[in-house]
Image: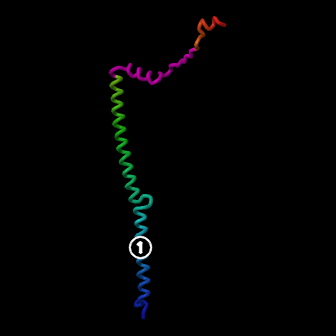
Amino acid sequence: MSAEENPVRNFVRQWWFRLVIAALFAYAVYALMLNEGGIFQVMELKSQRNALQAEIERLEAEKQRLEEEIELIEQYDPHIIEQEAREQGLIREGEEIYRLRYQEEPSESTSARR
């Protein structure tokens, strides 16, 4: 019986070949799908990118709207801006803030008793 005709040897060769193919397939699946840069992570990153891009577009539109609103207010009445700033507690550059403390003075009836 030659080596080529030995059924046990042929079985082992086929088994070894199938094992190598299965290992290569498993590695390919891991490399393409499960590791960093795999398909699942790429899809997740694309989804995050799309969400962030939509948020950027929304914020840019809001910024544009607010800039137009500021421009209209400045054209219409600059005193509105100052009034709003004062209500928010803002001051102009170079201004100084004075805080006054009030002391309660004794009334005349209390000081006369002493």
- Which residue is located at x 36 percent, y 37 percent? 60
For the C terminus, give its image quadrant: top right
For the N terminus, give its image quadrant: bottom left
Amino acid type of the residue that numbered disc 1 sits on in the rendered structure:
Ala
Task: Identify the magenta region.
Answer: 75-102
- Which residue is located at x 38 percent, y 19 percent? 79
Instruction: Give the image quarter of residue 98.
Output: top right
Q: Residue furthest right?
A: 114
Q: How many marks?
A: 1
The percent coordinates of residue 72 (x first, y second) are 33, 25
Image height of 24 relative to 43, above or below: below
Q: Nearer the viewer, residue 89 or 79?
A: 89
Give yes or no for residue 104 being in the magenta stretch. Answer: no
Q: Residue furthest front?
A: 113
Image height of 50 relative to 4, above or below: above
Crowding around mark 1 (Cα neighbors within 10 Å: few <14, some 14 to 19, many 20+) is few
The percent coordinates of residue 77 (x first, y second) are 35, 20
- Which residue is located at x 41 percent, y 56 percent? 41
| Rendered image coloring scheme | rainbow
- Which residue is located at x 44 percent, y 79 percent? 16
Q: Which residue is mark 1?
A: 22
Instruction: Give the image quarter of residue 34.
Output: bottom left
Image height of 35 relative to 91, above or below: below
Q: Nearer the viewer, residue 4 or 54?
A: 54
The percent coordinates of residue 103 (x first, y second) are 58, 14
The percent coordinates of residue 97 (x first, y second) are 52, 19
Image height of 63 relative to 46, above or below: above
